[in-house]
Image (tube, rainbow, N blue to C red):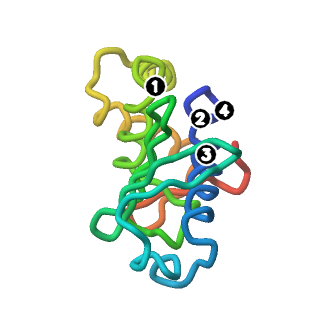
Amino acid sequence: MVTDALAEVMEYVALQGSLLSALCPTAAPGGPAGFADLPKIGEVNVGSEPWRYTRHGAGVLFRHQQTGRQIDVHRHLDRPDLFDAWRLRTYFGSLGRRGAKMVERATGSRGLPLDQAIEELLDIWLRAKAIIEENGSYRLSDGGS
């Protein structure tokens, strides 16, 4: 059941956790400790790779300098294991055609707008028990299907 898209989400979740840890090593309920004191724009290194970050509202957007990959953590900064349709749309969209193709293959649908395809993909993964819903967000199931 692990498609290229689901494997990519597994990597995404791990990377999201690493980026948030690099940004604010000490997490606290409600968000990482010291988040509000960080500069609005800066850089963190994960795996010796530079990622630029921009704080916005209650969240942060990470952008890989060389590849353009983006991870937008717009809420639940204290839960790096969570993702939602917005986060996946941003991430797969930042992968360009490669991301769109992964989603198309996983849903079996071609030509859908990425937003709609991501929603369909989340439904597929929920039915397959590959992910679990938590208050409007999702996390990978413990089995990792």
The local crowd at label 2, few if under 14, some if 14 to 19, many if 20 or more residues have their Cα within 10 Å, is: some
Q: Nearer the viewer, residue 141 or 79?
A: 79
Query: What secondary structure is marked by label 2?
Result: helix
Query: Residue 8, labelled with which disc?
Result: 2
The residue to which callout 4 is attached is: 2
The residue to which callout 3 is attached is: 130
Three-letter amino acid code at the position of disc 4: Val
| Residue lying at 56% horizontally and 62% vertically, measured from the top left | 20
Q: CA distance from mark 2 to mark 1?
A: 9 Å
Give coordinates of residue 73: x percent, y percent: 42, 58
Tag 3–tag 4 contact (CB < 8 Å): yes
The local crowd at label 4, few if under 14, some if 14 to 19, many if 20 or more residues have their Cα within 10 Å, is: few
* Circle nearer the N terminus (3, 2): 2
Give coordinates of residue 32: x percent, y percent: 52, 76
Tag 2–tag 1 contact (CB < 8 Å): yes
Give coordinates of residue 66: x percent, y percent: 51, 30
Three-letter amino acid code at the position of disc 3: Ala
* Circle nearer the N terminus (4, 2): 4
Q: CA distance from mark 4 to mark 1?
A: 16 Å
Three-letter amino acid code at the position of disc 1: Gly
* Circle nearer the N terminus (3, 4): 4
The residue to which callout 1 is attached is: 99
Query: What secondary structure is marked by label 4?
Result: loop
